[in-house]
Image (cartoon, rainbow, N blue to C red):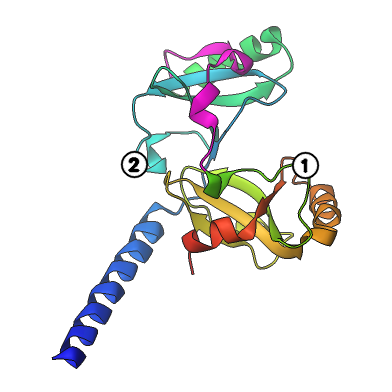
């Protein structure tokens, strides 16, 4: 009886993990729907849509390869394209975005988005404080996307790790570094072009790793 129980549990777990893998394969995309936890400069962009809930598939974003997702305190998730240094520069690109089918698009200053408490991430996705604990192991978060991307996106890095967190956002990290040299590794990775990368404690992410 005990053996049957163990075999049954193993089968259920195997089915569950297979289902997750299939879901991820179905979601994987070359589109980059970037999850933002705060507005970053340059702040001007073109908002294409605001939704109560994120779309289920990246294909929802017709003719758009890159967009940024801003979860706001009013319960809407806002999506914007482009990064412009001024309102005038953004406005010059507005017509082309509307021409893609986003008739209600308009210029926005993303610094005005009220993200506040919505972006206070849980401990599992909390950025490391400036004070690094030498006794802990860190990894460098490269980016976060609403939908899983192909790892070939990180073409100048090897062994990129993929995590699907409780908020259903996919986060991508690289490396395992002791606190004693974590900041040096972060600087090296930023030099490779990942200017928004930052350190996180690896143990907080490991339960959500996609193998």
Mark closer to the chain start, 1 or 2: 2
Question: Which residue has dot 2 on it?
Answer: 56
Q: Secondary structure at mark 2?
A: loop
Asked whether residue 70 appears in the rendered view, the answer is no
Q: Which segment is the magenta one?
A: 102-122
Question: Which residue has dot 1 on it?
Answer: 130
Left/right of residue 132 with respect to residue 34 in the rendered view: right
Q: Nearer the viewer, residue 124 or 13?
A: 124
Q: Does the residue at mark 1 contact the one at mark 2 (Cβ under 8 Å)?
A: no
Q: Residue at x 37, y 36 (%)?
A: 60
**Label 1 to label 2: alpha-carbon separation:** 36 Å
Where's residue 156, x and y in %? 74, 59
Where's residue 41, x and y in %? 72, 23
Task: Say above or below: 95 vs 157.
Answer: above
Within the image, what quadrant is residue 137 found in? bottom right
Q: Residue at x 69, y 7 (%)?
A: 88
Task: Say above or below: 126 vs 156.
Answer: above
């Amino acid at each position: 009886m005990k053996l049957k129980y163990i075999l049954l549990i193993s089968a259920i777990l195997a089915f569950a993990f297979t289902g997750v893998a299939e879901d991820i394969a179905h979601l994987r995309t070359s589109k980059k729907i970037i999850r933002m936890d705060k507005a970053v400069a340059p702040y001007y962009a073109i908002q294409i849509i605001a939704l109560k809930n994120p779309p289920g598939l990246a294909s929802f974003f017709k003719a758009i390869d890159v967009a940024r997702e801003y979860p706001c305190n009013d319960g809407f998730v806002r999506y914007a394209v482009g990064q412009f240094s001024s309102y005038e520069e953004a406005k010059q690109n507005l017509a082309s975005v509307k021409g893609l089918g986003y008739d209600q698009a308009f210029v926005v200053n993303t610094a005005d988005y009220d993200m506040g408490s919505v972006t206070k991430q849980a401990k599992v996705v909390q950025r490391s404080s400036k004070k690094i604990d030498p006794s802990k192991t860190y990894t460098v978060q490269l980016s976060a996307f609403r939908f899983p991307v192909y790892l070939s996106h990180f073409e100048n890095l090897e062994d990129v790790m993929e995590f699907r967190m409780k908020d259903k956002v996919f986060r991508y990290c690289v490396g395992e570094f002791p606190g004693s040299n974590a900041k040096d590794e972060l600087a090296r990775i930023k030099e490779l072009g990942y200017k928004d990368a930052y350190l996180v404690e690896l143990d907080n992410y490991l339960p959500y790793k996609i193998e």
